[in-house]
Image: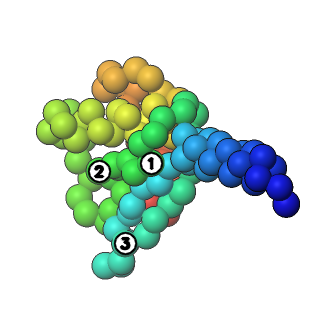
Amino acid sequence: MNAPRKWMMAIAGAGIVIVMVCYTGYVNSYLDHETQTTFFLKRYPTLQMKFYDPFANEGDDESIDQLPPIDRARFADYCKYRFGIVDHGTEALQACKAKIPGYLQ
């Protein structure tokens, strides 16, 4: 294999990895005293891969309004990239919470 062909393959491989990072995300859930990782396809590209879902555990179910501002903002980011919900209002975040798969709650 000649040098230009190797460089083209390396560039193509790097491009594929960047696209995969931009469109793949994950969230950790805490069930039965274990941490489970769930991967998902993002609706919008971003280099952020790890997202936060405060409702992905077996603990008490808080309301959206009781979340601290930083947790609410991180949850809104999760809703945007996983479900395409870009509104940060309480009703939109409630709709997002309802879309979370049952095995993550």
Give the residue at the far right of this rendering. Answer: 1
> Closer to the N terminus: mark 1 or mark 3?
3
Pick whichever, 19 or 51, lies toward us.
19
Q: Amino acid at mark 3?
A: Thr
Q: Residue at x 34, y 23 (%)?
A: 88
The amino acid pointed to by label 2 is Pro
Q: CA distance from mark 1 to mark 3?
A: 17 Å
Seen at 81% across and 50% down, the residue is 5
51 horizontally vs 62: left or right: right
The residue to which callout 3 is attached is 35
User: What's the residue at 47%, 54% (across, down)?
Assistant: 26
Question: CB of mark 1 within 8 Å of CB of mark 2?
Answer: no
Q: Residue furthest front?
A: 3
Is disc 1 surrounded by few (<14), some (14 to 19) or many (20+) residues within 10 Å? some
Estimate how packed mark 2 is, as few (under 14), some (14 to 19) or many (20 or more) residues with alpha carbons within 10 Å: some
The residue to which callout 2 is attached is 54
Find residue 31 and report its horizontal and vertical position in percent. 37, 72
**In the image, residue 49 lies at what x, y percent?**
44, 48
Q: Nearer the viewer, residue 41 or 23?
A: 23
Indicate whether 24 appears above or below 37: above
Q: Which is in the foreground here, disc 1 or disc 3?
A: 1
**Residue at figure coordinates x 54%, y 57% from the top left:** 39
Q: Circle 1 is placed at which residue position?
A: 49
Kindly state the secondary structure of the residue where label 2 is placed. Answer: loop
Label 1: which secondary element: loop
Q: Is residue 63 left or right of residue 86?
A: left
Q: Secondary structure at mark 3?
A: strand
Q: Nearer the viewer, mark 1 or mark 2?
A: 1
Q: Amino acid at mark 1?
A: Met
Picture quadrant of residue 30: bottom left
Is the N terminus in the top left, top right, bottom left or bottom right quadrant? bottom right
Labels 1 and 3 touching (C-beta < 8 A): no
